[in-house]
Amino acid sequence: MHFEYRVQGGDFVRAGQASSQVKKILKQLNVSPNIIKRVVVALYEGEVNIVAHAFQGKIYVDIDTDKIRVVLDDVGPGIPDIEMAMKPGFSTASPIVREMGFGAGMGLPNIKENTDKMKIASVVGVGTRLEFEVNLKE
Amino acid sequence: MTVKDVVEALNLKVYSGTAGLNKEVTGGYTSDLLSDVMGNAPAGAIWITLQTHVNVMAVATLKDISAVILVKGLEPEANTVVQSNNEEIPILGTNLQAFEISGMLYNLIHSK
């Protein structure tokens, strides 16, 4: 099964819609609640990263019997130092975004913790591609 | 214990999401960082926070939070109320600050 979602940079009102859709789909597929939780945490963080940092993005979700694979592709400023971005507590979010309770530098670590495979590729001034996989069988 | 029991015991205001007042409460989580709640709050918890914007409801929904308590008399924004009603997750309120209401909720949950 393949699904695509569009994400608009700066649109915090809709942040989380893709995650909510995917959660519903996985529930319908009778995926175990623990695994749904992991997927949802990772996807929501990825979605919010696009909203908080990029201009726009697309999310591609592929679900088969064994695993869910998600690609989040954005057009945005890119990440100059991915290793730094992965450090818990490191964030480049704006003061306004931080006031909302985002930008605590927990997003990427949360994604890493809740996925079985994770990869980030980024080109400064062009955009970022985050890919992750979660096994659906425990 | 249901959300309604907590509302009555702690004298909370109910702003929205009344359809969810019968949800079961199994714990609590106090935090104003959305990623912290996303990463760590247990399902069924009441979430205590000062954040009033609509993303609170996105996180609450994704994490199967039973209800949200806004502290210090803060009120939810209009679109937060709409989402709370749609998702049937109540938004509650207190004039107390987070430390005090957390302590009261802790005692309530652990006394049963």
Image (cartoon, coloured by chain):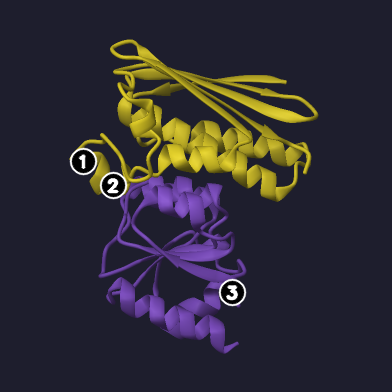
Near mark 2 (Cα within 10 A), the count class, few <14, some 14-19 or many ≥20, is some
Which numbered disc, 3 or 2, marks the residue closer to the eye?
Answer: 2
**Chain letter tied to yellow:** A
The Cα atoms of the two marked residues, 3 and 2, are separated by: 29 Å
Describe the element under mark 2 as helix, strand or loop. loop
Describe the element under mark 3 as helix, strand or loop. loop
- Quadrant (top left, top right, bottom left, bottom right) of the C terminus of chain B: bottom right
Instruction: Inspect the image, locate mark 1, and give the three-letter code of the amino acid beneath it.
Output: Ile
Chain B rendering hue: purple
Which residue is denoted by mark 3 in the rendering? B2
The Cα atoms of the two marked residues, 1 and 2, are separated by: 7 Å
Q: Looking at this view, is B4 or B59 the one in front?
A: B59
- Asked whether the residues under marks 3 and 2 belong to the same chain, the reply is no
Near mark 1 (Cα within 10 A), the count class, few <14, some 14-19 or many ≥20, is few
Chain to which mark 1 belongs: A
Instruction: Inspect the image, locate mark 2, and give the three-letter code of the amino acid beneath it.
Output: Met
> In the rendered view, would you say B6 is above or below A74?
below
Q: Which mark is residue A96?
A: 1
Q: x%, y% of residue B80?
A: 38, 49
Chain to which mark 2 belongs: A
Residue at figure coordinates x 50%, y 56% from the top left = B40
Does residue A71 appear anywhere in the picture? Answer: yes
